[in-house]
């Protein structure tokens, strides 16, 4: 997974042809997402890994420096076996409205529908 994060950062800063090569290598065909672009200075590290028989969940900690402050959030990757390797089958980010709690102002968050995670 660490190789994945390192390569994603490098390729997202490169040309669209290089990014297409990277997507083909790590992501299940047909899965599209807006979570691919890492900007210069962004970081993402693995916080936890939870394995099951058929899939693995990887939680990451992401950060971006904005002016004089640092914005942090979590990412959630679901990966599955693909022969001798693995592929990403979904990516979600911590909901920016409820900060991943699933609730806002005493009721279910309308953005993430109470899940605490958003896929786009």
Image: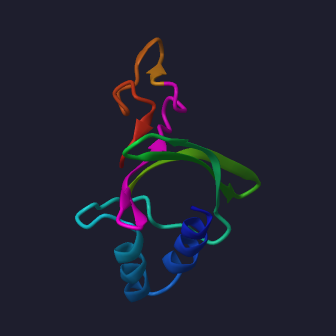
**Residue drawn where x is 35% and y is 27% of the image:** 110
Which residue is depicted at the point 38% across and 73% down? 23
Question: Residue 107's x, y, as percent?
Answer: 41, 14
Span shown in magenta? 81-101
Q: Position of residue 25 (x, y in %)?
A: 39, 75
Please state which of residues 81 and 29 is positioned toward the viewer in this rendering.
81
Q: 108 above or below 53?
A: above
Magenta-colored stretch includes residue 99: yes
User: Which is more toward the observer, 108 or 81?
Assistant: 81
70 relative position to 102: left or right? right
Q: In the displayed structure, would residue 59 be above or below residue 19? A: above
Query: Image quadrant of residue 36?
Result: bottom left
> Is residue 50 located in the magenta-colored stretch of the structure?
no
Q: From the image, which quarter does the N terminus lie in?
A: bottom right
Farthest residue, direction top: 106
| Number of numbered discs visible in the structure rendering | 0
Q: Residue at x 28, y 60 (%)?
A: 31
57 vs 45: above or below: above
Q: Residue 47: x percent and y percent?
A: 65, 46
Q: Quadrant of residue 84?
A: bottom left
- The image's colouring method is rainbow
Q: Residue furthest right?
A: 68
**Considering depth in this image, is 83 or 49 the residue closer to the camera?**
83
Residue 14: percent from left, percent from top: 50, 85
**Which is nearer the eye, 42 or 27?**
27
């Amino acid at each position: 997974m660490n190789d994945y994060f390192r390569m994603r950062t490098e390729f997202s800063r490169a040309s669209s042809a290089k990014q297409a090569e990277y997507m083909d290598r790590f992501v299940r065909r047909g899965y599209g997402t807006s979570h691919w672009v890492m900007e210069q200075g962004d970081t993402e590290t693995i916080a936890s890994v939870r394995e099951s028989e058929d899939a693995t969940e990887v939680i990451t900690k992401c950060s971006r420096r904005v002016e004089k402050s640092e914005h942090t959030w979590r990412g959630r990757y679901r990966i599955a076996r693909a022969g001798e390797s693995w592929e990403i089958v979904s990516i979600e980010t911590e909901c920016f409205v409820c900060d991943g709690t699933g609730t806002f102002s005493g009721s279910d968050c309308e953005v993430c529908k109470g899940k605490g995670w958003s896929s786009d």
